[in-house]
Amino acid sequence: MNKLTVNDAIGQALAEEMRRDARVMMFGEGVATKRPELVKEFGGKRVRNTPLAEGIIAGTAAGAAATGLRPVVDLLFAPFLCFAMDEIVNSAGKLRYLSGGQFEFPMVVMAMTGAGWTVGAQHNHNLEAWFVHSPGLKVVMPSNAADFKGLLKAAIRDDNPVLFFVDLALGYAPGDVPEDEHVIPLGKAAVAREGSDVTIVSYAKMVGSCLQAGAELAAQGISAEVIDLRSLKPLDEEAILRSVRKTGRLLVVHEASRLCGVGAEVSAIVAEHAFDALKAPVARLTGPDAPAASSYPLEQAFLPRPDAIAAAARKLAGHARSHALHIGEPEILSI
């Protein structure tokens, strides 16, 4: 194992895949400036900065992918994806289907998202659910350095366009990363903490907050199982259902706003396929339906905090099964 930051794990994955496959290239906003080691090893033709023109970057990537290359593009901040929706959603996401499989679009679109750097609402907006809802796209949002490396390598090798979101607050978070070939299949969740009383499902940096809450709950005699989704599309439904059937309780936590979010999909899956296992209403704890603040204290208040997660899980653990049977819709918890 090597101790690497998330940013270094991403760089290691890029370098390994570029050595493995000469078709892999990277371009985007500041990529050559941020990763000079890649420029030194692979040259300016395969690693290059671009103008700040997200639609052109994504469109170029879609064209490059259609001609047999495997581009990785960096659009910097997630809200900037708004300038590339046609190229990502209407072209890369749909043209493989529209061509009857004659074309493939093996491209990775990277963007930073989430609170932690006080970059303000026009740079911090969790948009992952938009792309989960878009046919033809895959969506990845890891929580730790090892998963960033393993999932990025899998995303680069995939023959479909993959949105790869990097939570801003995780960039310099260290973690153990395997030294050997390390590829994590897309669509496989991880059990970050074993438990028997309540299932907490999350992704990205909220997994760390859920693990903190799990430790607090353990001290109070409540055993929480934490599921790290890692991949939002494809979604590992079996891992979610297996855990909920064991614990009988579900709390979904994410930083993105509640309405039509990933938590709603997870809740619906459990309601449709494991309702008979539930001992309490499904609960969601999310960010508010509001733009993110550029003040650090307000930005932190925007997030589901570990103490709020623990409180929501305690409430679920205290419900009797008879209570759940008299509630017509999942209980909603929001900050």
Image (spheres, helix red, strand yellow):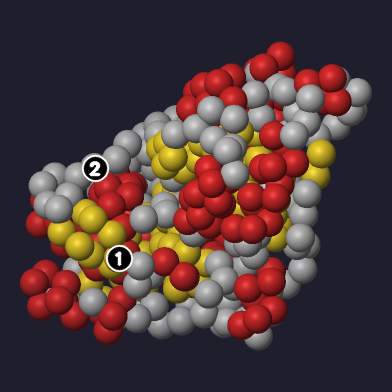
Q: Nearer the viewer, residue 76 or 305?
A: 305
**Residue at 59% across, 19% down:** 245
Image height of 151 relative to 329, above or below: below
Judged from this view, the residue extending furthest toward the front is 220
Q: Which of marks 2 and 1 is nearer the N terminus?
A: 1
Residue type at the position of mark 2: Val
Q: Which of 278 and 294 is in front in this view?
A: 278
Image quadrant in which the C terminus is located: bottom right
Image height of 219 relative to 273, above or below: below
Q: Residue 174 carries which label?
A: 1
Evaluate whether residue 18 shows in this view: no
Q: How many labels does the image show?
A: 2
Q: Position of residue 31 (x, y in %)?
A: 31, 76
Category of crowding for the residue at label 1, using alpha-carbon neighbours closer than 10 angstroms: few (below 14), some (14–19), many (at least 20): some
Labels 2 and 1 touching (C-beta < 8 A):
no
Q: Position of residue 317 (x, y in %)?
A: 69, 34
Marks 2/1: CA–CA distance: 19 Å
Q: In this view, does 132 lie to the left or right of 321?
A: left
**Residue at 35% across, 72% down:** 172
Question: Residue 252 falls in which quadrant of the image?
Answer: top right
Q: Which mark is residue 166?
A: none
**Residue carrying label 2:** 183
**Residue at 66% across, 30% down:** 249
- Nearest to viewer (mark 2 / mark 1): 1
Q: Where is residue 239 in the image (x, y as percent from the top left)?
A: 48, 27
Q: In this view, does 67 lie to the left or right of 314?
A: left
Residue type at the position of mark 1: Pro
